[in-house]
Amino acid sequence: VEWEAIAAVAKTEAERGAYGPDGRPTVLFERHKFRKFTNGAHDHSHPDLSNADAGGYGSAEHAHAWSRVTRAYALDPEAALRATSWGQFQMMGFNFPMTHCKNAHELVLYLTQCEANQLAVFMDFVRHEELIDALKRRDWAAFAFKYNGKDYAKNKYDERMARHYAELKGATAYVIPQRWRLAKSLAKLRAQVDAKCPGRSKASDGDIGDAAHAAKGEDSDHNAYIVDGDMPVVTAIDITNDSEKCSARALADALVASRDRRVKYIIFDRQIVSSYPARGVPAWTWRPYGGDNPHDKHLHISVGKESSAYDEEAPWQV
């Protein structure tokens, strides 16, 4: 796993670092978790510490965060430690079974010793949750779903990871635009495919890139780097491989046979074909594709950066 991918998690979780100015670990107390571990025993007496609703953190100051942990600890030590996230990777105390530690107390003692221990526990967790591949693929959404929870998109966890990764790699962080449009040539192609294959599956259709694509910057045509006037333009689409109603292989073969000048390259089932010679392979000739995504569930089509390619609306020969 790239160190930048791991560091992106650390920056997303605790931008202030592993420890506060007093030398104690960075912490965040989760009142809804404390309620769960104490069966709501303190809901009425301490609603700010035991509550069905998440949040209620109050001040973001290190001392305030610790005061909440300390007060909860006085009520129920083990529950308080379990309901708190610790250190650079904000590891929840209740995750101790996924590590070599026997209980939350042992985990917290281990995490407070040094940053190396915090990294070791983080790696224990990602191995246990089978998240190594997601980090290797830079699939921030898949990682965020398991690490941050099903509501990760609400706080843009995956997008923040992508930005931090790009910054650490020394690249300009690409931000997914709020306004964008699809290249007219690709809109035309998709409309033709829809007309020819009514009822086709669109499970893997796509156009604008997600946070995982954003981390790749200009390497992905799903990112709207081309701007027409003031409107960002996406110059790639994915069309789902539906073996019954819309064969991606048949569509790819038709596009290759047409030699349409608008095509930049096509990817399907671990193969790529370009409209220009590449890596010693002639134009319009398939070659192996070694990217992170095998593209076995959809066909990827990219068009050229010139407006005569991406906005030409002539019918496609498909």
Image (spheres, rainbow, N blue to C red):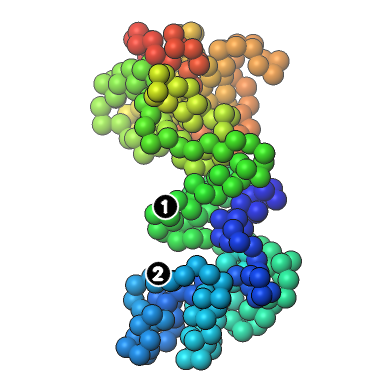
Query: Which of these two is toward me, 173 or 135?
Result: 173
- Please identify the quarter of the rendering in which residue 117 is found: bottom right
Q: Which dot marks residue 26?
A: none
Q: Residue at x 48, y 85 (%)?
A: 72
Q: Give x and y (percent) for residue 82.
A: 52, 79
Name the residue tied to disc 2: 55
Query: Tag 2: residue type?
Result: Gly
Q: Is residue 47 above or below residue 16?
A: below
Q: Residues within 10 Å of mark 2 (few under 14, many from 20)?
A: few
Name the residue tied to disc 1: 153
Q: Residue at x 39, y 54 (%)?
A: 154
Label whose residue precedes the other's in the sequence (2 or 1): 2
Q: Nearer the viewer, mark 2 or mark 1?
A: 2
Q: Residue at x 58, y 29 (%)?
A: 219
- Please identify the quarter of the rendering in which residue 236 is found: top left
Is residue 244 rendered to the left or right of residue 257?
Answer: left
For the C terminus, give its image quadrant.
top left
Query: Tag 1: residue type?
Result: Ala
Q: Is residue 37 visible?
A: yes
